[in-house]
Image (tube, helix red, strand yellow):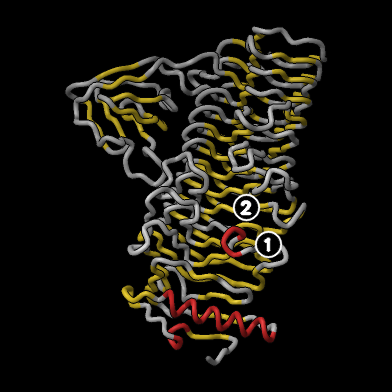
Amino acid sequence: MDTPLTADARAYGLTGDGETDDRPALQKLVDALGDARAADGRPRTVRVPAGRYVIRDRPVLWRSGVSLIGEGRGATCFALRNPGAPTTPVPLAWFTAAQHGAGPEHHLADLTFAHFEIDGSGVSTEGYDVLAKGLGLQYVRRARFGDLYIHDTAATGFGCDFLQDTVVEGVLAERCGRQDPGGMMGGAGIGIGVGGWGPVERLSVTACTATGNGTNGIFLELQQEHWTPPRGVRVTACHAEDNRYGISDWGCDGLLVTGCVMTGNRVAGFDVSAQGTTRVGGRGGIVTACVVDRNVRDGVAVGNTPGPYAFHGNRISGNGRHGYWQHNLSGGDQEAAADIVLDANDIRDNALDGVRIDAPLREPAFQGNRVRGNGRRSAPAAHGGGPGVRYGPLSLTDEGADWAPDGHRGKRLTAGGDTAMVTGNTATVLTLAPARPGAASAWPGGTPPDGTGYRLPEAPGPRAGLTAAAPVAHPCVRGNRVRDDGHPRTQTHALWITDEGTWTGGRVSGNDFSGNASAATRFDSAPAGGRWRDNDG
């Protein structure tokens, strides 16, 4: 076979007719170009004209130095199917440590995957399989992945690990993790394993969008517990919406997240925790200039980290529980996190506490934040049914209600034998979250008939700007504005130390704690030592 530097896929047997299995012809072409590159060291490119190319029952084993370039999203599409191999995951391209011996000394290099679509809706395995991805490559150097549309895969859409000197740019991942029930590994829009190249992995993920994916929109995950969490990973200008988690750091050191939007995610907009395969949380990260808004539960959830971690200049607003939640999951690091910094953030309009500390902190710094108007979940219990009560796929309307705006945000609505999560409300209409990411309805059992009786629970209290429900040692709380200017006020206190919390040493100075619904502070456990001065309220 002739092996030019650029090969037209149609000239080498691919049909793109949507019916013919194009996998054998593509595999033959990739092997020929890979052999030529190995012989002369010159990378090759497969150019794929517009068409729908079926990859059936087996993935394509990729070769170093071979790029795949289409004519654009919606023009060049690879349709993955496995009708003859229901136990076999079928990514478009794969090269892995377990199946192919991939590693630092046996890696892919000099690749570009760009300007095409991957449709994973035709792959279903008998049980959930993490390898049922759109792309599944490991140990890659000097690569660029750009302008890709990956959707409806059974597991992760873009599932490539150990990417050195690589850029992932302009990837749109929708409704991936289709077979993930919600608690499995993988199932993300963009999931990238880290740690295989040692303490530094030079990777940029930029201008990517992840919506409606089963687990994470975008996550970075340490793949071996004994590996060093790597530095060098950046996530910039990305959008994560309607996933279980928006963007997650499960094992990096110094992850930079800048200028991203995390909205409408089921559990948290941004997550640091031990939920990854190695149970190692991220540390040393910096999150700045992001909008973390209207997530169903928490805006930012941080735990299982030794610290430090810093959040600068973010808007953390309108979330269904806490704006910022410090907590630890079982199975991960339980030590006090050191040097957590919240600086110049706008933490407002969240359903419960603006900042909630449920895990030990050592020497945290909260400075220059505007923590205002939280505690929106203030409406009393409610119930109804009969005439005037109507249900939609994502709503409940009670014409006889007179609810406080967003007073039920984050509550669990019970209607008949089903439940749904409330994301907001007007005086008469509840807006509901989809039953799972990517779903079109809040009701797993089907929309209840009009008139069905419903119940909403009582609002919890207190609901403070800053709540310490765990040991906090030597904090610096300075120059914050923690108040509520709303009508009515729903943030009950600026600072609340609960019975479970302790507050030892440190400095609390120059804060504005005035104007909350009940009082400036509430100390169910008295602070011990430290300096408190010049705090209004």
Q: At 81% across and 16% down in the image, what residue appears?
A: 505
Task: Give the vertical position of 262 relative to 405 (above or below).
Answer: below
Question: Tags 2 and 1 in contact by the CB under 8 Å rule?
Answer: no
Q: Which residue is mark 2?
A: 193
Q: Quadrant of residue 45?
A: bottom right
Give amino acid for label 1: Gly
Give amino acid for label 2: Gly
Task: Give the vertical position of 107 relative to 297 (above or below).
Answer: below
Secondary structure at badge 1 equals: loop
Position of residue 158 in the picture relative to residue 447 (left or right): right
Position of residue 227 in the picture relative to residue 239 (left or right): right
Position of residue 391 in the picture relative to residue 137 (left or right): left
Q: Position of residue 51 (x, y in %)?
A: 38, 76
Which of pointers 2 and 1 lies earlier in the amino acid sequence? 1
Camera-side residue: 92 or 249?
92
Secondary structure at badge 2 equals: strand
Marks 2 and 1, Cα distance to the nearest angstrom? 13 Å
Q: At 64% across and 12% down in the image, what residue appears?
A: 500
- The single residue placed furthest to the bottom in the displayed view is 2
Q: Quadrant of residue 513?
A: top right
Q: Position of residue 305 (x, y in %)?
A: 70, 34
Disc number placed over residue 391 in the picture, else none: none
Q: Position of residue 245 (x, y in %)?
A: 52, 41
Of marks 2 and 1, the one in the foreground: 1
- Mark 2 burial class by Cα count in 10 Å: few <14, some 14-19, many 20+: many
Q: At 75% across and 24% down in the image, what residue appears?
A: 477
Position of residue 17 in the picture relative to residue 3 (left or right): left
Camera-side residue: 393 or 361?
361
Q: Which residue is mark 1?
A: 103
Q: Quadrant of residue 454?
A: top left
